[in-house]
Amino acid sequence: MSELKSKKMKSSKLLIIFKILFVLFLLLLVLTLSGLTAFYALTRDLPGIDALKDYRPSIASRVYDANDELLEEFFLEDRKIIKISQYFPCHVQKRGSG
């Protein structure tokens, strides 16, 4: 009689362990699919690598008078080309200098 009880206990413990592992597997599967779906949804509208390599920002149009004085600038984005050392002179260091 005790053999039958011990076999039932072992089988019930194995069944509980199997159920727990199965639920964890399903949870991991759902989380993985959710992550992949979110990644796809966020990245499908991004430009390709070639578009990033061929980036050309909009530039301002400048209107000058007869004396070469600037009258007005027209732009979508006010972009000015500067050297990084002009903007962050105290933070720019050569590589390798600790």
Image (tube, grey):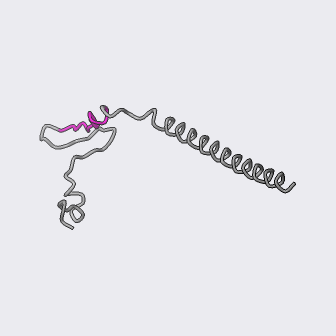
Above or below residue 4? Residue 95 is below
Tell me which residue sits at (71%, 46%) in the image: 19
Tell me which residue sits at (64%, 45%) in the image: 27
Residue 58 placed where, x, y %? 29, 36
Residue 54 placed where, x, y %? 26, 33
Of residues 67 and 96, the one drawn nearer to the viewer in this rendering: 96
Of residues 2 and 80, the one drawn nearer to the viewer in this rendering: 2
Tell me which residue sits at (24%, 46%) in the image: 80
**Bounds of the magenta span?**
51-64
Q: Is residue 85 magenta?
A: no
User: Looking at the figure, which quarter contains the C terminus?
Assistant: bottom left
Q: Is residue 63 magenta?
A: yes
Q: Name the image quarter holding residue 56.
A: top left
Of residues 23 and 1, the one drawn nearer to the viewer in this rendering: 1
Tell me which residue sits at (74%, 47%) in the image: 15
Residue 18 placed where, x, y %? 69, 47
